[in-house]
Amino acid sequence: MTVPELTEKFAELESHIAEEKGPFALFALFMREDAPDRWDLIVSAPWAGDDKRSVVDYFVSQIKSRLGEQGLTSLSRIVVIDPQDAAVQALNRAIQIEHGRVEVRDSNFFGLTVKHAYIITSQRPQAPAAA
C-alpha cells in the first residue's frame, strides 16, 4: 500500500469513527525518526475516556475490519492522548483541519522527532452545550 493510499484509508476510517463515536480532537499518523517505515496512529477524542486499553482494542478491530492486516502492520503503535493534554491543545491551535490531510515533515511533536506526519483531524473539542 502506498503512502497516499494509506493516508486515504486512515482518513476514511477517521470519518467513519467520528460519525459513529463523535469528533476527534486529534487524529494523525506520525512516522518517528527512530521507527522508519512504520506509523504511529495518534488519537485524541473526548469520548475516549480513561480506559486507553479498550480504545486501542477498538481501533485495532476497526483497522483490521476496514483496512485489513496491511493497515495494522503499517503501524508501530496506537497512542491515545487526552484532549486536555497541553501538546494536543498546542497542535490544535497550530493546525486546524477536519477530515482532511495536512502533511508535515521534520517536526517535533510530543517530545518526539517526527520525520513525516499526516494530520487528518486537529480541532479543539466543542464544549458541551449548557442545559
Image (cartoon, rainbow, N blue to C red):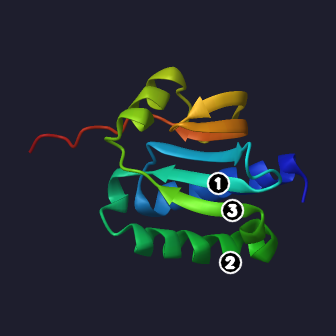
Work out whether residue 36 or residue 101 is closer to the camera in this orientation and state it.
36
- Amino acid at the residue labelled 2: Ser
**Residue 69 sits in which quadrant?**
bottom right
- Few, some or many residues within 10 Å of mark 3 (<14, 14–19, 20+): some
Report the residue at 50% width, 69% height from top.
Answer: 56
Q: Earlier in the sequence, mark 3 or mark 2?
A: 2
Q: Quadrant of the C terminus?
A: top left
Q: Which residue is mark 2?
A: 65
Q: Earlier in the sequence, mark 1 or mark 3?
A: 1
Decide: marks 1, 3 in contact (CB < 8 A)? Answer: yes
Q: Which residue is mark 3?
A: 76
Q: Position of residue 6 (x, y in %)?
A: 80, 54
Decide: marks 2, 1 in contact (CB < 8 A)? Answer: no
Q: Position of residue 54 (x, y in %)?
A: 42, 75
Q: Nearer the viewer, mark 3 or mark 2?
A: 3
Separation of marks 1 and 3 at Cα, in angstroms? 6 Å
Determine if residue 100 is in view. Answer: no
Separation of marks 2 and 1 at Cα, in angstroms? 19 Å
Instruction: Determine whether the residue tagged by mark 3 lies in a helix, strand or loop.
Output: strand
Report the residue at 61% width, 45% height from top.
Answer: 28
Instruction: Determine whether the residue tagged by mark 2 lies in a helix, strand or loop.
Output: helix
Work out whether residue 22 or residue 72 is closer to the camera in this orientation and state it.
72
Work out whether residue 129 or residue 54 is closer to the camera in this orientation and state it.
54
